[in-house]
Image (spheres, helix red, strand yellow):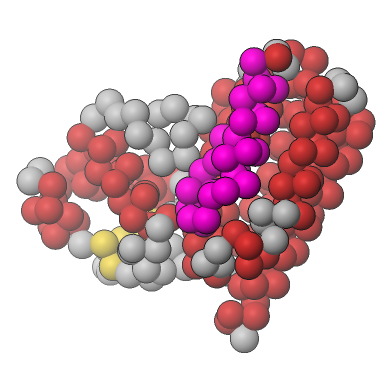
Amino acid sequence: MDDSNLFGTQTKTTADTIANSLREEILRGELEVSQGLRQDKIARKYGVSPIPVREALFQLAEEGLVAFFPNRGAFVSPLSATELFEIYAMRTALELLALEHAIPNLTEASLARAESLIAQMDSEKDICNWGELNWEFHATLYQPADMPRLMRTLRRLHVNVIRYMVSNVLDPDEIEYSSHNQSEHRQILAACRRRDVEIASILLRRHLDISSKVLVHFLEDKKG
């Protein structure tokens, strides 16, 4: 799977194809939280045996999107403020590590790509598409670290963040993602252009901390 693509459109097997389709349905909220995922029904939909369906569901379980319960089967994983806090704590630790190792290796092409992605986010109103562009922006800055295992982990964390955004925020403007967050992205990119690891790391940590608090607030407010 291409770790720079959040929906994983590059496929190798039937199970990958099914996992990609289910992943996008979950991220876009078309499959709701705690909704049952009957393997026989999914198999009929795709015209396959239950085996690749089960493999696809296990893939999504590894990403935190699906949960298996004894004697009950597979369900879309629930959402919680505690889990979201943990996701952002992991993102902060790992993304700071990635950025530190990536900055010395960033090329002008990578920086230009990151700038282009920020510009695309400025006008994107679909929260799911915005989240995918956000991942591509961060991934573009981190990939020069040459840490593929770390990138795979970060991709899974970003996939889960998208779920929280789609479930709780209908429009990026609602939480000022098209203004304040975009300003933070531009500040991080500017520090990367200067090869200033210290300032870029400070800005990234603050950026993730603010995003975490905003989304946790939205989730708790909705639950309350």
Q: Is residue 42 left or right of residue 157?
A: left
Residue 174 lies within the magenta run:
no
Q: Residue furthest front?
A: 123
> How far from the left and from the top, in percent, is residue 157?
57, 46
> How far from the left and from the top, in percent, is residue 182?
72, 47
Q: Residue at x 87, y 22 (%)?
A: 194
> How far from the left and from the top, in percent, is residue 96?
78, 35
Q: Is residue 159 above or below residue 70?
A: above
**Camera-side residue of 83 and 127:** 127
How many numbered badges does the structure rendering display? Answer: 0
Residue 111 lies within the magenta run:
yes
State the predominant SS element of the stretch in magenta: helix
Specify the quadrant that holds the N terminus.
top left
Q: Residue at x 57, y 23 (%)?
A: 148
Q: Residue at x 33, y 63 (%)?
A: 30
Q: Is residue 107 above or below residue 165?
A: above
**Camera-side residue of 198 and 109:** 109
Q: Residue at x 36, y 50 (%)?
A: 24
Q: Quadrant of residue 205?
A: top right
Visible in this render: residue 181?
Answer: yes
Which segment did they paint magenta? Answer: 109-136
> How far from the left and from the top, in percent, is residue 202?
88, 40
Q: Residue furthest bottom?
A: 224
Specify the quadrant that holds the C terminus.
bottom right
Q: Quadrant of residue 144?
A: top right
Visible in this render: residue 160?
Answer: no
